[in-house]
Image (tube, helix red, strand yellow):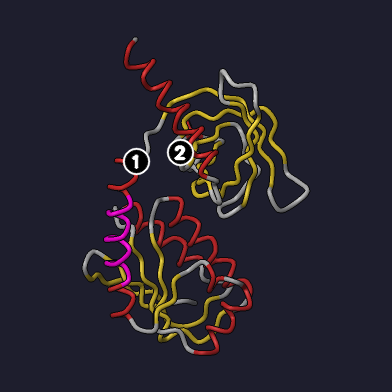
Amino acid sequence: MLEIHLRQKNNVVILDLAGRIDVDCANLVEITGQVLRDGYTDILCNFEDVQMIDYMGVSVIVIAYKEIINNQGRLKFANLPMHLLGVLAVSGMDKVIDICATEEAALNAFKEDKAIENIKKMQLRRRFKRLPVDLKIELKSNTLPGPVCLKVDILNISAIGAFIFGCDKFRLGDEVLLKMKLPPSTEEIELDATVVWIPDKAVQPHAYPGIGVEFRNLPTAKQQKLVEFIERNLSFMSSD
């Protein structure tokens, strides 16, 4: 049984873990969920007293991670023994979760993340506006033969991303391809994107099934078309 003790520093909830992370550690998911419901979004797991992680334990970590990300939270690990680092490396989790050598380094990383995020938000608010729309698009995986969602709706769009309603075939981190037309143009454009948000059906039923995507590798010419489309339609809305 995994023992978990909670404490708090600088608005970061620290979970001191002790024991084994295996099929019997559902309490990790339960506790992270409760932490999120209590209003905390920065969670640090201290692995100093963890003895082992098996493949079922990795699955539990993935579930907890997805819950945190879906609630716009952050998860970091600290004090991992070398043999546990190997397990996470094999599973690929070291690529998606920030692993810090010490608790102090992790706490500092949370501060840096917030500072960078605030700067980015200020820049994006100045540069990009979001437009409510109702556009039919085709959405498919950019890396695999399937899945495909035909004639789903973009409900809002900016020059850096969009919210797409009517498709539940993708997961966080999936790379997708959008095919769409920006009226009045009849030219079809293709946009590469990454799934960065999935609404919780119980909490956000109005947005389910849907996904938030962030455009990636977006050529300047395509981004300019998006900006012009958004600015043109926003001006129409404001004049009505």
Image location (x, y in percent) of residue 159:
45, 38
* Residue at far top of view: 240
Q: Residue at x 57, y 75 (%)?
A: 22
Compared with residue 111, is residue 227 higher up or lower down, i.e. above or below?
above
Using the image as rendered, state which of residue 184 and residue 192 is in the foreground: 184
Q: Do the numbered discs 1 and 2 sit on residues whose CB atoms are within 8 Å?
A: yes
Instruction: Assess whether residue 71 is covered by the magenta stretch.
Output: no
Residue at numbered disc 1? 127
* Residue at far front of view: 221
Image location (x, y in percent) of residue 136:
61, 25
Image location (x, y in percent) of residue 196:
50, 50
Using the image as rendered, state which of residue 236 and residue 165 is in the foreground: 236
Residue 30 lies in quadrant:
bottom left
Compared with residue 108, is residue 207 higher up or lower down, i.e. above or below?
above
Image location (x, y in percent) of residue 36:
35, 55
Instruction: Assess whether residue 115 is covered by the magenta stretch.
Output: yes
Using the image as rendered, state which of residue 204 and residue 224 is in the foreground: 224
Give the numbered dot on residue 29.
none
Give the structural element (helix, strand or loop) at label 1. helix
The quadrant the C terminus occupies is: top left
Residue at numbered disc 2? 159
Residue 6 placement, left or right of 84:
left
Q: Which residue is drawn at 48% across and 62% down?
A: 65
Q: Main secondary structure of the magenta part?
A: helix
Q: What stretch is highlighted in magenta?
A: 109-120
Q: Which amino acid does label 2 sit on?
A: Ala
Q: What residue type is labelled 1?
A: Arg
Give the structural element (helix, strand or loop) at label 2. loop
